[in-house]
Image (spheres, grey):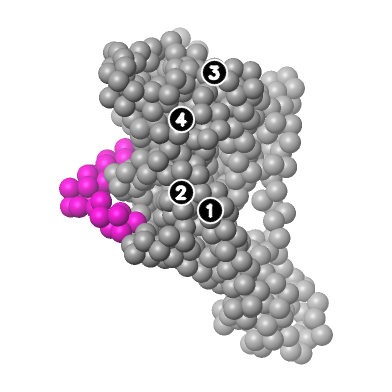
Amino acid sequence: MLDLIAHNLAPIMFITVMGMLLLGYPVAFTLAAGGMYFFVIGVEVSHISPEIQLSWSLAQANMNRVFDIMRNDTLLAIPFFTFMGLILERSRMAEDLLDTVGQLFGTMRGGLAFAVIMVGALLAATTGVVAASVIAMGLISLPIMMRYNYHPGLAAGTIAASGTLAQIIPPSLVLIVMADQLGRSVGDMYVGAFFPAMIIVVMYCAYIFAITLIKPQWVPALPPEARPLGNGGRSLFAILAIAVALFLTGYYFVFEDFRYETRVVWSALAATIIPYGFALVNRAINLGYLSKMAEQVVIVLIPPLALIFLVLGTIFLGIATPTEGGAMGATGALIMSLMKRRLDMKTLLQALDSTAKLATFVMFILIGARVFALTFYGISGNRWVEDLMLALPGGEIGFLITVSVIIFILGCFLDFFEIAFIMVPLLAPVADKLGIDLIWFGVLLGFNLQASFLTPPFGFALFYLRSVAPIKAWHDETTNRMIEPISTKSIYTGTLPFILIQIVMLGILIAFPGLVTHYKTEPLLLDQSDIDREINNIGGGGFGLPGSGLSLPGAPNLGEPGNGMPAMPSFGEPAEPAPGGALPAPGGLPAPGGATGLPNFN
């Protein structure tokens, strides 16, 4: 019996712990308890199986592994982005966006559904929290859609699916956790996920457009009395043209002597601040130059768009790390709330309390996962998972399909934090051995988890929407009629087309990995004039070396060892080769890591 246990301890441990999780036991404590319990068993039977590499002295490693979690700077982005999302949720930004965008698209069939998708994408890029997005749009949009005779299933499905966009649109918490567990850059994960996230938004809109052609009675346009802002298309187009002109003028003329990143930031700032200020003045003193619609759109949309640029734009340009971008986003959310006079001490304390709870939740799950992983790797569980996955038919495609099915099923029962901390560390080495790009793999898992949030009967987004959808007939004062409740069946059936879209998107991502892996071929965002200016100022230093004054956004430091790049030589006289063929660095010091220097550029 002991022989059987010793030689099959890895699958026994994995099945036992996963079974306890599916039964509903607390994740962090189940992982830690399972790791410690099987650690004791592993030590006691280690003399039977050579695959078990556990000893009592190894238990001391758990302390260092816990401290490694606390030293992980990447995880700081989680409380920053969570706090930013909570502040924006409590400042009723979703309410303003839905009202404004709904009236902007209200003249067309399906306008409210288009508005929900667009606002869902905007909320995803600012709050990054599925629960906040689904609940906010369910409370605000669902009654309006039912008031104007939208199909109940379509309305519920659109809201639930749009809310889950927070799973995949940067700065998604899912992408941060995936990048951390895969050992990859969060910035690369954001860049890789950007195009697929935009494609899924377009596919949602294409579905609504198809419904307007096939079942137009399901998605009626808003009546004129529901659009108090009117049309105002001409002045809205004019203010948009002015903003574009301001950006181009700033970029090519006003800030032409600055570096690329600085030119983009200051030009974008001018293109948003000037129209925004003009709209505020137009409203304050009633100038009448802008229509009510254009005025409202500028005042409501520019702040969140500016916040998105502050967070994602600075990350994509290489100006800020994701952690720094999260800190700036949290600060920007506070400023936006103060400007709208919707920030008080109670709101601030509630946001801080919720952020602390989520951060603690993540920390405890991570600690439990580390204890579990130490034991699981000590009993060669990683090799068991690797052999199991590599034995699947179909090679790379077979592995991706199997993993997608497993993650999809687990996503119906477990939170994405739990899946990321348990499953991803086990699957990533197999994906790496198969030659799968880990950023591509992480984005695939992110889309898979997004689909699982929608899947009946356990999709979390469905639960969020069910908690705020009316369960009884209610009297609408605007139309003075009774409106039927939203049934659970309507919520479930309404999400099915969006689940199908998610599956199609997963197939597209598997078939066209370049939609994600383009992050590896992104050109450096520098003008030739910037490069020439920096080279003239370098003197005797190499690129990226202290004192060179040059920092290439998103580029490796060419003077650092271990990055796959040779050390840069001195621009002065050629030096004699050091032992081993390495050229000494300036000042007679050996080149970093003994790397071979590049030929003299002169």
Q: Please tell me whether residue 291 is drawn above or below residue 526 in the rendered image.
A: above
- Calculate the distance from the C-alpha at mark 3 to the C-alpha at mark 4: 14 Å
The outermost residue toward the left is 346
According to the image, label 3 marks what residue? 217
User: Principal SS element in the magenta part?
Assistant: helix
SS at badge 1: helix
Residue 599 sits in quarter:
bottom right
| Residue at 77% from the left image edge and 79% from the top image edge | 577
SS at badge 3: helix
SS at badge 4: loop
Mark 4 belongs to which amino acid? Pro
Q: Is residue 193 visible?
A: yes
Give the magenta-colored segment's residue range.
336-364
According to the image, label 1 marks what residue? 236
Q: Is residue 592 visible?
A: no
Task: Tell me, yes or no, whether the highlighted magenta stretch contains residue 187.
Answer: no
Mark 3 belongs to which amino acid? Gln
Residue 399 sits in quarter:
top right
- Calculate the distance from the C-alpha at mark 1 to the C-alpha at mark 3: 29 Å
Q: Residue 370: x and y, percent? A: 41, 38
Do tag 1 and tag 2 residues touch (Cβ < 8 Å)? yes
| Residue at 69% from the left image edge and 52% from the top image edge | 520
